[in-house]
């Protein structure tokens, strides 16, 4: 795809400055764009990078007032405009042709909707049902009696254990495991662990996206539940019997222990851990690397180890940073106090080195 | 499966209150049970949830004294009783029929015990030996000269690199990698890293269960060792040359660095990290997200960053929480001290605002 | 392979003490070596373990002055010498014969260099190019239009999404996913998330090694970049648009958020997290479990939560450890101050228990 600067501006309904005939053949970030690319400046914080960019044109806001040696396209919202431009130059998406690949293994009693695709070396076990137009990539495992809704997209090397249910329009990225056994044991008298059967399953709502190499355990009994619209990043661990409310966001490497409930629209930031049998309220925010050890009220932002309300946590960190100063202050007071205590004995303050310890 | 309340009580040798003829068709937790399910109340903490449950019957202890609108079955230990009931209603487990699937690829010199199953698209490389009745699911990779004991269960998409050994009755969940190269390099003069060959292997004992998407690296030389009865949760990282003692428990997302020894029956809680070349003693407990930077004596419970004995760590956190108060106290003392120091000059205490800084 | 102690010493150009005719058949660490093995002592810290080793010979330095009941081989650098010895006794590496396995599925227009190997149940999609002598193991997924350089080694169950590029001599361990969608959404008025298309790709340099079950997301547009010589350990998460400089080292379970740049030769230790849109300078070191929330200057060593210069962080931790003492000191000062304040009213110091609160 090649478009001139003038053509891009015209498609965006925007004005431009500089060489309108300049040919644009791709897109890139300010830092990684090359000659022939168009880039954008959304955050004024990065304005200084404009001088160094290799791009041939930049989408900027009306407020941008630096000189630039390349073409400028003035947009109300450079970020949103760039999102449009990116799509014009995007490589054609990979097409997954419908149909069962001859090297896929689909059980005779599995029910596939219209337009379903099953890729090579994938297995669909007995009793599974796959909704219309859902694409199962190569090397996927769909366990017995699984149900997958319509218009889903299951990337290579995903594993769904038996009886797992996914809603409509669910995306699951490569290497993710849904429905593995929960981690539950009883301790015998001798200290060995005996496995507690994990007889439940996992139910995932509609419009959910799950990242790569995630693990979601099946319930001990009943269901581990991922609500509608939930977005889960890579390498997240969700233990048995967890319930995640609609539209919650779980960022990479988070771990959520057994039977915990995450409220709708809550956001759990990267590498945070949430203990077992807790409730994180609707719309709550858990900061990165936080360790949640008790319930979090709806709407509250918590952070730190153990997690406390973020402002309190920040205040404590500020206090910690001033500990050396506090310690000096304490020593100084002790010295002055000793001097005062010594007064009855001496006319003036005691000379340094002679105060009582 | 359908059982009446009276039939369930009779099988448990328990008394019941309410409608004994009520038909029960499933099980569920207090919160997710539906009409027709039986549930249980083990922890009095959740007694208030009894009123809201949709279940048709509840296993409760003798001490439970609330009114309930549904049938109650009185058990000495509702948790244990429920574990039994759950099995009566459990869906039939997935059967893995013995035999090598025609779409599996098994090396001619691999040795398979009686009743072994190898699923479709799995690979068993040259010289591998698999014990009697062990089930290798679909899409599994068993490297050259691996040895797997009897009665094991290897779920889809597990990878065992060459020469890895698993004991008897080992369960490995989907996506787990055992025997990948340890992370070892020498630094050249120019700052580049040169790979140190990782020539050892991994040996896993009997009765071990390993979760999903776990990584266990092979030793630089010799063996990374996972003892008998060890239980490892999802997304755990175990580096080269680690030794884990019998019956230790490693919770999700823990990382254990190279050459560290974890004592028997030790418990490492979720997201904790243990540094390299350390010893965590037998029966020690490492708290969630703890950072272990030195040896932990047998039986000790450590937590925090860096990990210290848990009680000490709790005490320090309490002190930190009171830092604002301490700071105020310090300011108050300074004011009083200044007032005292000013005394010789004034008859009474200096008025506020006139103390020396 | 069997060598005598004298033969090993001779090959190393080293002197030995003890039974030169003793037959050595393997290698092992001090703690796990068995009769017939040779081991080594590099770190004097472990000298006390020499007495307990089961090994039949030990490589030691000239400075080692303990008595030993087994043969000693004196080396300038026992660690380096042992690395040589290990290779003599190493099992023959697994050979991956060149050629496309009849059970692999390679698109007709894929371009394979000379000596390429593609294992069983692997998929190489349309337009992919694989460099000479690169080995693709079993059950690997190589997406459309991927490019892999020469002499690479891609272990079983790795997934490369479309258009990902790997340089020469790249090693990718089992279960790793490269090119999964970045985690990007816009929030609608109702609080739901709408997926932002992730149209970019991932470019990996030469001589890179990537561990097991790692996830590296493709850029929103443009490229997520892994520089030359970078080494990445297991279970690491690298988000969209991250740039990692040449020869950086990323240890297990680290997470790097979107658009962050890691400088060349930087080292990010295990379980650390680096926030989004940050710059970690060249040669910087980030400690284990650290939480990087702002830019790190080149060469700086940071640690802690939030990450601060390591020495400062250590100093603050020392202060925290002394908080109980500080609190006692404060109470003592308060008591002495109260006594002083009481003086005008009493001839001597107030008796304990009568001071003002």
Image: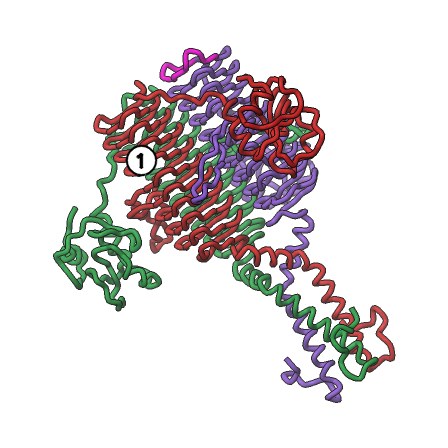
Chain colours: A red, B green, C purple
Report which quarter residue B148 is drawn in.
top left
Residue closest to the far right: A347
- Using the image, determine if residue A165 lies above or below residue C352: above
Residue C160 image position (x, y, % from top left): 47, 25
Where residue B299 sits: x, y (%)?
A: 48, 56
Q: Is residue C201 left or right of residue C157?
A: right
Label 1 SS? loop
The residues colored magenta run C100-111
Q: Chain of mark 1?
A: B
C146 or B43, which lies in front?
C146
* Number of numbered discs on residues: 1
| Label 1: how many Cα within 10 Å (few below 14, some 14–19, many 20+) | many
Residue beneath label 1, please? Answer: B150
Q: Quadrant of the C terminus of chain A?
A: bottom right
Residue occupying the point 47% across, 17% down: C128
Q: Is residue C196 visible?
A: yes
Where is residue B119 shown, x and y percent of the image?
Answer: 30, 27
Residue at the image point whose x is 24% and y is 59% from the top: B59
Residue B211 percent across, percent down from the top left: 39, 40
B51 sits to left or right of C311: left
Q: Is residue A244 magenta?
A: no
In percent of the image, x 30 and y 25: which residue is there?
A: A116
Magenta span: predominant SS is loop
Q: Is residue C110 magenta?
A: yes
């Amino acid at each position: 795809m090649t478009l001139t600067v003038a053509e891009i501006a015209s498609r965006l309904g925007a004005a431009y400055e500089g060489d309108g005939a300049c040919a644009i053949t791709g897109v890139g970030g300010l830092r990684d764009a090359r000659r022939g690319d168009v880039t954008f400046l959304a955050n004024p914080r990065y304005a200084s990078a404009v001088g160094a960019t290799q791009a041939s044109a930049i989408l900027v806001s009306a407020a941008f007032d630096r000189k630039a040696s390349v073409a400028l396209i003035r947009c109300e919202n450079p970020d949103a405009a760039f999102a449009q431009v990116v799509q014009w130059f995007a490589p054609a998406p990979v097409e997954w042709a419908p149909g069962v690949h001859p090297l896929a293994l689909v059980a005779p009693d599995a029910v596939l909707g219209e337009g379903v695709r099953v890729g090579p070396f994938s297995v669909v076990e007995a009793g599974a049902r796959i909704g219309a137009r859902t694409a199962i990539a190569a090397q996927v495992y769909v366990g017995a009696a699984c149900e997958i809704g319509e218009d889903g997209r299951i990337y290579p090397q995903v594993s769904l254990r038996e009886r797992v249910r996914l809603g409509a329009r669910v995306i699951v990225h490569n290497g993710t495991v849904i429905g593995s056994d929960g981690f539950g044991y009883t301790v015998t008298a001798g200290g060995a662990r005996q496995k507690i059967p994990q007889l439940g399953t996992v139910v995932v709502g509609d419009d959910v996206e799950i990242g790569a190499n995630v693990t979601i355990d099946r319930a001990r009994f009943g269901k581990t539940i991922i609500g509608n619209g939930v977005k889960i990043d890579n390498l997240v661990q969700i233990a048995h019997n967890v319930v995640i409310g609609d539209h919650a966001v779980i960022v990479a490497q988070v771990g959520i222990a057994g039977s915990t409930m995450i409220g709708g629209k809550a956001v759990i930031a990267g590498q945070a851990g949430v203990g077992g049998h807790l409730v994180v309220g609707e719309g709550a925010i858990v900061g990165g690397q936080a360790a949640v050890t008790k319930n979090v009220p709806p709407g509250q932002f918590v952070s730190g180890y153990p997690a406390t309300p973020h402002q309190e946590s920040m205040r404590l960190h500020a206090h910690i940073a001033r500990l050396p100063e506090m310690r000096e202050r304490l020593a100084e007071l002790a010295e002055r106090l000793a001097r005062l205590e010594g007064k009855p004995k001496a006319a003036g303050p005691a000379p340094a080195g002679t105060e009582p310890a």
